[in-house]
Amino acid sequence: MNVSTIKKLYYSIGEVSKITSLKKYVLRYWETEFDALRPGKNRAGNRIYKKEDIQTIFLIKKLLYEEKYTLEGAKKKLAELRRDKDFQLKLSFEELKKDDVILEVKR
């Protein structure tokens, strides 16, 4: 199953385990190792995963299992990817602001 087939807002750890083909204990362990993976909890204290959490899990899985990163290497790569994403978001926001200024000047 891939991320694009995800339909619900929240998923239980059992559902995420099936979606990602990972054991529940692996998901719980990764929560302790990766700062980027922090699922919420419902009133009963059960983990609830959003689509973004599942995307992060797939990325971690790819780094560890396919690209053969160590845990430390995967942490660094994930942090680097998140920084780049934040940087790209900042750049696109600045571009939007410039476009707004240009529109104001044209008026």
Image (cartoon, rainbow, N blue to C red):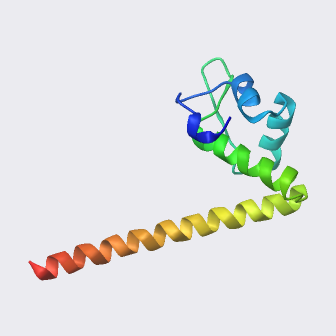
Residue at image location 85% in from the left, 63% down from the top: 73
Please tell me in which quadrant of the rendered image residue 47 appears.
top right
The residue lying toward the viewer, choosing from 20 and 49, is: 20
> What percent of the width, then of the height, locates residue 44?
65, 17
Along the viewing direction, whichever of 91 and 19 lies nearer the viewer: 19
Residue 26 position within the rendered picture, expressed as x and y whole percent measured from the top left:
85, 36
x%, y% of residue 66?
A: 84, 53
Quadrant in which the N terminus appears: top right
* 7 sits left or right of 34 in the view: left
- Residue at image position (52%, 30%) is 9
Q: Quadrant of residue 80?
A: bottom right
* 64 is higher (above) or lower (below) than 84: above
Which residue is at 68% across, 42% downward? 38
Q: Answer yes or no: is residue 55 visible.
A: yes
Q: Nearer the viewer, residue 88 or 1?
A: 1
The answer to whether 78 is drawn above or below residue 56 in the figure is below
* Residue drawn at point x = 68 percent, y = 22 percent: 45
Quadrant (top left, top right, bottom left, bottom right) of the C terminus:
bottom left
Location of residue 29 with respect to 75 vertically, above or below: above
Q: Is residue 7 left or right of residue 20?
A: left
